[in-house]
Every structure is written in structure tokens, then in C-alpha cells.
Amino acid sequence: MRKFLICLGFLLLATNASATEVQRRTANDGQLIMEDIPPIPASLAQLLSRYQHVRSARFSGWSEDSDSIYIKTRFGPVSQLHRVDIPAGARFQLTFADDPVGEVAGQPGGGLLALTRDREGDQFDQLLLLNPDNGLIRSLTQGHALNNRMVWDRQGRRIAYRSTRRDGRSNDIWIQGTRPAATAKLLYKANDGSLWKPVDFSQDGKYLLIQQFRSVIDSRIWLKKLPNGEPRLLVGDAEHPAANIATGFDRHDANVLFVTNQRDGAAELAMVSLAAEPVITYIPSVADWDITQFVLSRDRRRGAFITNENATSRLYLFDPARLKYKRVDNIPLGLISGLSFSPDGRKLGMTLNSARSPNDAWVLDLGRKPTSAKKLTRWTFSEVGGLDTRKFTRPVPIKYASPLANQDPADQDRFLPIPAFAYLPPGDGPFPVIIYLHGGPENQFQPSFNSAFQLWIDQLGVAVIAPNIRGSLGYGSNYIALDDGYKREDAVKDIGALLDWIALQPLFDKDRVAVFGASYGGYMALASAVHYGDRLRAAVDRFGISNFVTFLENTQGYRQALRRTEYGDERDPEMRAFLERISPLTSVEKINIPLLVVQGRNDPIVPLSESEQLIKALRSRGQTVWYLEALNEGHGYERKENRDLYQQVAFLFLQKYLLGED
């Protein structure tokens, strides 16, 4: 606590902002700027500390001998890479940088690890090679460019990856050997603004499978003969857009396995031949549930995939030879991610998470048959700060009705069911409510371990409702597209419908409701403040879009085409006028509730200017706004000391303006 108070030791400054005097101070060695935020009481920092000492461990790969696993976990300010040799064993730290480790990819047959790491949240990932035996690490890339989505060839001699180094805007594909003298070569020059990335090398290394991502509803799969062959389209086209996500070549390099929603239903498995005239074989779907991850073993004799069933994960083992699959039933109910077969194909690693357990690494031992499973073993047991997670609130799935109304008059009297999750404190209510809005927009809220929710529930006595408004993943391709282009504000109406629903529930206090969102969720929080300020007490906007036109003009160049596909092209005069009209900044005079705005100085996704212009406009009207800016963060707070202080500020803000307590 003493260290925290010393670190918080602030320097009071006075600046003039049009209508009001801004009280500014700094914290965390000057890396956090706090404007108009009152001092954090020492008692509050102490109260919240247990919730802020939760750790997690993400499964991140296998040692080449298949005996040890790699995980990402935090013992200092940010997550680093560790090795674990036995279940519940010690975590041996392998990286010691000031910034967290991103992607991890093991070298076939060699044991080196390829890593990505950015600098202070700028998301300009650089590729590194780590020897886990001696800790030596060297850079493969340098400069002001994004380098990621890396994949090794089967012999472990080359890495293909996506890079923006050519012009800062194009998502090209490059290839590079691992020897110190090896130089990177441009493999595919992308000039259409799409995201292009390598997926898999053929067994002989002569072909590269490439994924093109144009939008959440339009992705395509290409095959390129190395080094200079023209890419050949295997799956997808402009006339019939669909999501087609490549997994890899089969055992004989005769087919490519992938996930698709071409048949207008949920995402399902499929296989396309590599013949001159490709033929697609669809594999009977798992009911109506989307497949969220599909992986193959190194020898291609096994596969595994995860389905999203009502925002909960199910694991299936897959036989690539027989195109058959079987569900694994001994997996704890929760969320599964990070599937990875061991190099020998005998084990399957994964990350598991539930409402009462943070991310931890687990390993499933496999049977002789490709679809048979044996024992599931938990390899890591992450600390939870002394909290009794058995008492954590379990979310309750709910649905409420929202008007379907859009441009079609026939839809004016129809309603759309909106799925959501409600976290309730003990007691009979009525409870104040925090509406938590996910980002994306094509993300999905899933009921994972969330110590912040539990903090609000325990210490503020509030309920948390997390809706998956239209545009969210997990509910079919039609639902994803319901907020595209000129239908953007139909999603905002889903928040109005939720407020209507809350008002009818005796469990909730309709007069004490706040909205809380990050990134696109930050836009939704601001838009809700514009449209429903008379029914809200406060709003929290983290890295949110305040003006779609300036956002699209200033987000990093390699993202612009993808975001224009989602939100609309601001270069078109008609669309520009529409985007200006629906932007919260345009209607800032309608925002009459207190705001907490949180931003990272180095954010390449939603630039700093989005928060700065919003705050300037609000202060010019004398509106209450607290502002927190981290100088060493980007699109999210990765450093524990910054995240802790942000959570304390958010708690104080909600306590004051949602609950009305000083």
C-alpha cells in the first residue's frame, strides 16, 4: 500500500479548458494522466486489491518433445512466456521484457519459438526467435510496421507472416529463413486493403495456403505455388460472400479443410479438393452451432474443433480420414480456446475458463483412434487473490425483444430476440444496473471469469447485464449483418429495448442504470448517452469511437478498408453525411450525464484524437467528464499498475454517479 501511495504521489497542475478549470495530476511515475478525477482513498485501493491480484495462464504451445507446455502468465507488470514441465508444476519464466508476449509458434523439428511483441501497446508487432533452452532471443523484424500471423513450414526452416512493412497500409505476406543472415522476401503483394495471412505450408513446402479476410461475412481461401506462382482462388467469391476460414492441408496434400457458412447456416466443417476444378465436400453440421476454432495435428491424422453453443464451448475430436467427429464429454462447462496438438499427436492442449475459474492450461490425453479421448488434466492453478470463487455469481441467460425496424416498412411491427447474460447480487433488489457492452462490433459476450464484474457485484451491490446486440457473433450470419452500414443505429435501439425491459423487472432499479463499453462498445455507450440520457445515470467510454468519419480517417492504414466494409466508406458523400449524423460527437449537446473516458496514448485502433475531441466538446459545455490517459498503453491497459488504477477510478466513478454516494 505504501508503495502505491508513493507511486500515486501526484503533481497538481492547472490548465484552462474553455468553460471549466481542469484539475490534472499524474500517477505511476508520470505514465498516467488523470483529469478531474478525485484522489483515490487509500481505503478503496486496499478494498479492491484482492480483486486485482487474480492471475491467469493461457496455453501457448508445446515443447518439441511433447513433454512440457508453454503458457503466458503474469508475475510482474505484464504477461510473459513460461514453461511448465509437469501438471501443477513450477512455472519457469522464459521472457523478461517490458511488454507482453503476443503470438507463440513452435519450430517443427527444432525447438525454437517464434514470438511477437509490440511496444507500449502500439500494436506494431515485431517477430522474435527464442531459444527456450538458453533464453537467447533475436529479432527477425524491426521498424514501424505490423508483423504477425506467422506460420512455420513443415521442416522448420522458414516462417511466413503478414507484414505492413512495404507501405504501412497493405497486409502483404512475407517469408523468411531462420538463419541470422537470412533476409525477408515479399511473397504476396496485397493492394486491396483486405487482411491477407498465411495459414499452412504443404508437406513438401512447395505450396502455401493463404487466407483473405474482407469482412466478417466475406473471407476467401487461396493457394499459392512457391515462390512466384499466382494465387489460385479455392473457396469464396464476391457474388456469394460467405465466411470461409482455412485450417490446413490434409495428410496427402490433396485437400484443404476449412470452416464455412456458405450454406447460410451456422459455421460448419468442409473440405475442398485441390483439383483443377475444386470440389467442396460439406461435413454434416453439429446442430446449428457455429464452429469457432478448428485445428489439425502435425501429421494430419487428427483434428479437433470447438463449437459455440449458447455462448458456451463444446469440444469435438475429428477424424480427417473418415470425416467423422465425436464430442468430448468430460470437459468442464465453460469457454475453451487455444487448441493445440502436441508434436507427437498424442495430447491436446487448451485454455479453459468459466464464470468461477480464470484461464488455466489443461491437457487432454488422446486414445488410439482419432476421435477417442482419455484423461483430462489441469496443468496450471492460477492464483485468485484469496477470493472464494465458489461464491462468484453465475450468469443467467436471458432474452428480451427489440424492434426489428429498419429500412423495410414490412419490418416495422416485428421484434428481434436479443440474447444477454445477467449477473445478479444476492438479495431481492431492486438492484442498480451496469449494462456492459462488448466491442467488435462482431464480437460476442461470453460468460467467462470476470473479477471486475464480481467486484461491482460484491462491493457496489449492482447487477450486470451483458447483451449481445445485433451484429454480434454466435447467432448466425444474418444476425451479424443486422447492424451493417445504414442499419448501425438499429443496434443502438437494442439498448433502448433493454432499458424498457429493465423497467419492467422488479429486480432492477430503473432509475439507477449506467452503460459501460470499450472500443465499439465505447461508441455504443456514447450513443446510448445521446439517445437515452434521460434513463441513464452515467456512462464509461474506454477507447470509444466518438466520430465515425474521423475514426475512419485516422485509424491505422492497414485497418481502414476492413473498417469501411463494416461501418461504411466515409469518402462517399452520402455515407459520410450519414456517419456524421449518427456520431455521438455530432449530438454532444444531448449528452447530459457524467462520463468517464479512458484512453491509451499509443492506440492505433481508435486513436487518441477520438477521446480528445469528445472531451473538448463536453468541457466546452461544462459537462462532467473524468479522463484517464495512459502514456505507455494502446488499445487496452496491459500493465497491472495501470489496470489497477483504472479499476479504482471506475469504481469511484460508479459509486459517485450511479449509486449517488460521495
Image (cartoon, rainbow, N blue to C red):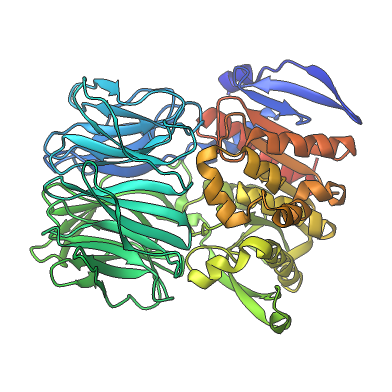
Residue 576 lies, in percent from the top left, at 72, 52
Q: Position of residue 302 (x, y in %)?
A: 16, 60
Q: Is residue 233 left or right of residue 538?
A: left
Side of 141 relative to 412 (left or right): left
Q: Quadrant of the N terminus?
A: top right
Residue 382 visible to an observer of this rendering? no
Q: Looking at the image, how many numbered discs can be counted on the residues? A: 0
Q: Is residue 102 left or right of residue 39?
A: left
Q: Nearer the viewer, residue 171 or 651?
A: 171
Percent across and percent down for residue 542 are: 64, 42
Task: Say if 210 sits above or below 91 in the image.
Answer: below
For the residue pair 644 and 319, the one nearer the viewer reads as 319
Residue 582 visible, this orientation: yes
Residue at image coords 70%, 30%? 40
Is residue 568 shown left or right of residue 278?
right
Residue 548 lies, with reference to residue 216, above or below; the image says above
**Where residue 486 sits: x, y (%)?**
68, 63
Look at the image and tell me in which quarter the C terminus lies.
top right
Residue 132 picture quarter: top left
Quarter occupied by residue 481: bottom right
Q: Is residue 395 above or below residue 456?
A: below
The foreground one among 286 and 163 is: 163
